[in-house]
Amino acid sequence: MTIEKTTVFVSGATGFIASHVVEDLLKAGYKVIGSGRSQEKNEGLLKKFNNNPNLSMEIVEDIAAPNAFDKAFQRRGKEIKVVLHIASPVHFNTTDFEKDLLIPAVNGTKSILEAIKEYAADTVEKVVITSSVAALAAPADMQDVSSVVTEDSWNRDTWESCQTNAISAYCGSKKFAEKTAWDFLEANKSTVKFTLSTINPGFVFGPQLFTDSLKNGINSSSAIIAKLVSSKVDDKFYNYSGPFIDVRDVSKAHLVAFEKPECAGQRLFLCEDLFCSQEVLDILNVEFPQLRGKIAAGEPGSGSSFLTKHSCKCDNSKTKKLLGFKFFNFKDCIVDTASQLLEVQN
């Protein structure tokens, strides 16, 4: 496929991961059609990209609404060869887990695939869906030292069992949305011609593409770092742990996922290593003299023993081989994230 002529559709283009993806696509010479929730958001993004002639936007107000993507694909479907479905509901402020998390995630995935089938069945060749490590393992398994998470793992929660709290329900929503995509392809393989890949990142850290995006809030993973950056000396903190990846690697992986034929049909598990909050604090206290003695310190150096006792193991050697590029290390990722947060604070 010739890069110059390839048009890529990016859902949720104004988001944390997606804006990096849009940047990488434009740099690589692709034409990009993004979707955003409102005219105002869309115009804001176009402006940030200096009204690049290769970027245009469509409004998709609510990805969970029935036929949410129909208008966009009716208008533009014949131009689109690649679809990157990145938009997904992420919030934990709900007690109606089915209505606010599970159904929207599943419907969002279903509606974009239905729109492709209806309006672009003969033009879309590749679909990449942004899933999550949450589709690979339930929260309890992420903290089980005997558990090894790989590309073949699936979160074992059911639709019912994941509805115990917002975190489990969110994790369940990622599983069921991803399952929906694989099942859809299986059921419609005689009608559509696209191949499917999924991107399954751990906690996604790293800088926002546009610093001023932080004024509108922060993605839930980076919020962990923001909280530690603004902690006080004696603060007790929750020691989050799990696999991490830098947003810049997540973005790059989206491109490789559709450019490399070997990635078709694969789940790409993005994890550079395991992390815990204590290790974030260790880096902040060493690398930022202005924070030392003012923020929490916890028990410096105890991170690795905490992980040994409280975290699963991850094996994503298959993904690393398929992608063929080196991920950002933890220190650089945290330093870049915190530097931007401090710049905005100042």
Image (cartoon, rainbow, N blue to C red):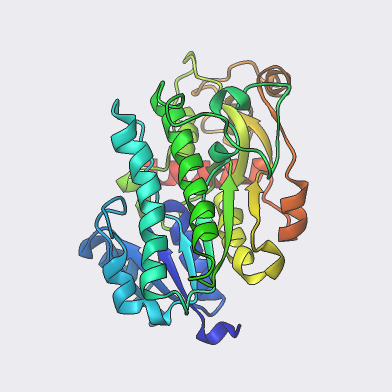
Give residue 169's position: percent from left, percent from top.
42, 30
Q: Position of residue 83 (x, y in %)?
A: 47, 67
Nearer to me, 222 or 1: 1
Query: Is residue 214 placed above or below 29 in the rendered structure?
Result: above
Q: Residue at x 49, y 28 (%)?
A: 228
Q: Is residue 145 above or below residue 260?
A: above
Is the C terminus in the top left, top right, bottom left or bottom right quadrant? top left
Count of number-bearing discs: 0
Q: Nearer the viewer, residue 311 or 282?
A: 311
Q: Is residue 308 visible?
A: yes
State left or right for residue 312 relative to residue 77: right
Image quarter for residue 242?
top right
Residue 276, x across and y down, in percent:
61, 27
Q: Which quarter of the figure is the N terminus placed in?
A: bottom right
Q: Is residue 209 visible?
A: no
User: Which residue is at a point 47% across and 79% down the rendered structure image?
Assistant: 123
Residue, far left: 39
Along the line of sight, the residue nearer the viewer: 30 or 77: 77
Q: Position of residue 243 (x, y in %)?
A: 63, 36
* Residue 60 vertical position relative to residue 103 in the rendered view, above or below: below
Q: Is residue 216 above or below residue 113?
A: above
